[in-house]
Amino acid sequence: MNKAPSFAAFASSRLLVVGGSSGIGLATARIAAAHGAFVTVTGRSPDRVKAAVASISADTASASFDMTDEAEVEAFFATHPPFDHIVVTAAAIRSAPVRALSLDTARSTFASKFWGPYLIARFARLTDGGSLSLISGAAARRPRAGRGPVAAACAAVEALTKVLAVELAPVRVNCIAPGLVDTPMLRAAYDPNTPIPPQPVRRAALPEGIAFQILACAANPYMTGSIIDLDGGLSVM
């Protein structure tokens, strides 16, 4: 008889968080480590990654690479044994109306949100029955003015998730689509006096709430190809 899914399954597992130096990624790394996982945190900034690792546990490892750089991603996975779970939360995005956003900025935003996870999926080494968790966003189905490249990239990540769930099986691939999350990125991009969009849960999410759902997907051996809306009810308004 199979055991019921539980975060206890992370004990002694190898879990990689791409983009784990802050926000959702850091929260994911902390929760996984608290349940006994051997966590590796990566990011582009060595200093930020080291600071994040110091706040997690002594057993947490670190690495620095740009996930949109094919050679760097390939080299990282070539020098590490397979992971049991990989979570990709990294993204460097900028938003503005289509006619106001430079093409270079639009391209880099799409590259970070879509091509980064694509490269991770291409070169990742995962154990059979392991998992890959991606992050899209509420913009995939609730796009709004000024969010063109972000909305397009989020929708592309969700389509990629379903393709990868078939191509990488028995590795499981799932995607979380958050709404507003109280992260350093959000605070840097939004005026603190800007009201939260109308939604049943009238506040931004905590990173830990999104991280909990990411790990729930990773821990559930029957879950793959799923897109989980975690947006405070925004999708039903």
Image (spheres, rainbow, N blue to C red):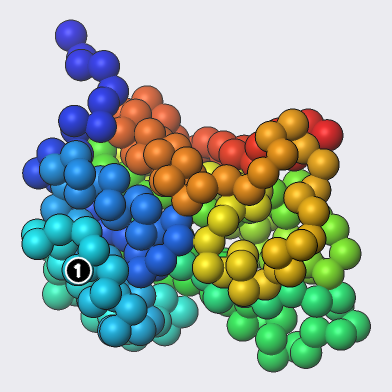
How many circles with numbers are drawn on the protein? 1
Residue 230 spot, x, y in % from top left: 59, 39
Residue under the image location 67 percent in, 82 percent down: 107
* Image-quadrant location for residue 216: top left
Q: Quadrant of the N terminus?
A: top left
Residue farthest to the front, as pictured:
193
Q: Is label 1 in a helix, a strand or a loop? A: helix
Mark 1, residue position: 54
In which quadrant will I find the C terminus?
A: top right
Tell me: residue 3, above or below residue 63.
above
For the residue pair 12 and 74, the one nearer the viewer reads as 12
Whether residue 120 is visible to the viewer of this picture, yes or no, is no
> Which residue of the protein is positioned furthest toward the top in this rendering?
1
Give the side of residue 121 with respect to residue 13, left or right: right
Instruction: Name the residue rendered at 36%, 40% in the picture.
Output: 215
Residue 123 horizontal/vertical position (percent): 32, 67
* Image point (74%, 31%), residue name: 200
Instruction: Please tell me how crowded label 1 is: few (under 14), some (14-19), or many (20+) other residues with Cα within 10 Å.
Output: some
The image shows residue 178 at horizontal and vertical percentages of: 60, 47
**Image side of residue 216 versus residue 161, left or right:** left
Of residues 128 and 30, the one drawn nearer to the viewer in this rendering: 30
Viewer can see residue 114: yes
Horizontal side of residue 87 vs 58, given as left or right: right
- Residue 163 drawn at (x, y percent): 52, 48
Q: Amino acid at mark 1?
A: Ala
- Residue, x 20% and y 44% (percent of image)? 34
